[in-house]
Image (spheres, rainbow, N blue to C red):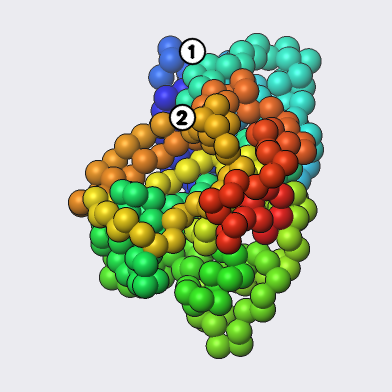
Amino acid sequence: MRRALSLAAHGPAYGPNPRVGCVLLDSDGRTVAEGFHRGAGTPHAEAAALADARSRDIDLRGTTAVVTLEPCAHHGRTGPCADALIEAGIAVVHVAVPDPNPLATGGADRLQAAGIEVTTGLLADEGEDLLRPWLHAIRTGRPYVTLKLATSLDGRVAAADGTSRWITGPQARAHAHTIRAQVDAIAVGSGTALIDDPSLTARTADGGLFEHQPLRVVLGRRTVPDDARLRGPGGPLLHLPERDLDVVLRELGEREVRHVLVEGGPTLATALLAADAVDELHAYIAPVLLGAGATAVGDLGVTTIGEAARFATQDVTRLGDDVLLIARRAGLARASTDQPDAGRTGVDRPVPQQPSSSSTSTNQSHQKEI
Ligand code: AOF
Ligand code: ZN
């Protein structure tokens, strides 16, 4: 299964389909064929492994298939893998993660009905880790939301005069571009689109464009000017003037956006955090102190420490002078708690009736609106 997981990781992290790996073993436990999924419309991992075996005339009767995701039972962009494994005469199938996709699920039952021995849950945590955004999107109907913050040590995104280039250094910025190249969409608020005129492209170290360019999403009412960089080279542009975050996330889910990276500004970041709609935080923190100036996050409606928006640290990386802290929404760290949670936004965290007196300017954050 470890080999199948590392094969799966060769597939693209973006796109509507999951990353899946498959290894076929003979009765002595030796690998006879391998495959992984290369993206929507291409053969599934099991089909790729079967094709690999066929290309070398290997008789698969009595062999074992080790697959990171339960084999599918549906005719979608390709045929059902469960049937292909049955036809090939596979005797045993080991699975890491059951398939939550209602369209494709049922493969394990079908295999068992055909007399194949099936075990599920082998290295399940690692399997869930690899598929985290995809599983979340399939289970909830909404994309996995990663919020990127690039701040000074005191949580600021600009100095008092509004200047902001560059708080974090080149290594942190380069890293952020590699993340852009792995997600389905990047979202910003329409105010930030107007003021910053970002391009929201995924760029390589030499300034070229990565092959995969995420969908560029602008959220909010303000129009995107005709000459905005967002209309230049890069991924397609989607402007959603809708202000209700539930509606926005469901709309993105329907467009098969599995993972959205939110890059600001503070109004959008605050609204998402206040609505408990952020699944993962990428905090690039520079050892810079500003003491004044705009903060990355505004009033969350937290009046007492027990109401703080808490995340669980997953990883800390040094990037030049800066630090990247990756943290997940508490409760998301383990797969078993990653349950369907319709209506999550805006209801989980206690919200006071009165906004706190200290922050009246950026303070629409108590609603699930942007
Ligand atoms: C994959 N690759 O290796 C496996 C998948 O759009 P389709 O017809 O290709 O079907 C995609 C669904 O098939 C996917 O959501 C998942 O439930 C199942 N298994 N998908 O793309 C694979 N094994
Ligand atoms: Zn399949």
For the residue marked with disc 2, what is the amino acid? Ala
Q: How many marks?
A: 2
Q: x, y (%) of residue 108?
A: 71, 21
Q: Residues within 10 Å of mark 2 (few under 14, many from 20)?
A: some
Q: Quadrant of residue 51?
A: top right
Q: Which residue is mark 1?
A: 27
Task: Give 19 or 291, whichever is nearer the viewer.
Answer: 291
Q: x, y (%) of residue 337?
A: 62, 23
> Residue visible at 67% across and 78% down?
223
Q: x, y (%) of residue 28?
A: 43, 12
Task: Specify the farthest residue to the bottom.
Answer: 227
For marks 1 and 2 on the same chain, the one whose residue lies earlier in the sequence: 1
Which part of the image, by quadrant, shows the C terminus? bottom right
> Residue visible at 44% across and 61% down?
294
Q: Residues within 10 Å of mark 1 (few under 14, many from 20)?
A: few
For the residue marked with disc 1, what is the amino acid? Ser
> Residue visible at 58% across and 38% down?
302
Task: Give 321 or 20, whichever is nearer the viewer.
Answer: 321
Residue 84 vs residue 122: left or right? right
Residue 342 vs residue 123: left or right? right
Q: Which residue is mark 2?
A: 312
User: Image height check: is 343 above or below 209?
Assistant: above
- Tell me the CA gap for discs 1 and 2: 43 Å
Q: Quadrant of residue 290?
A: bottom left
Please report contact status of discs 1 and 2: CB closer than 8 Å, yes or no.
no
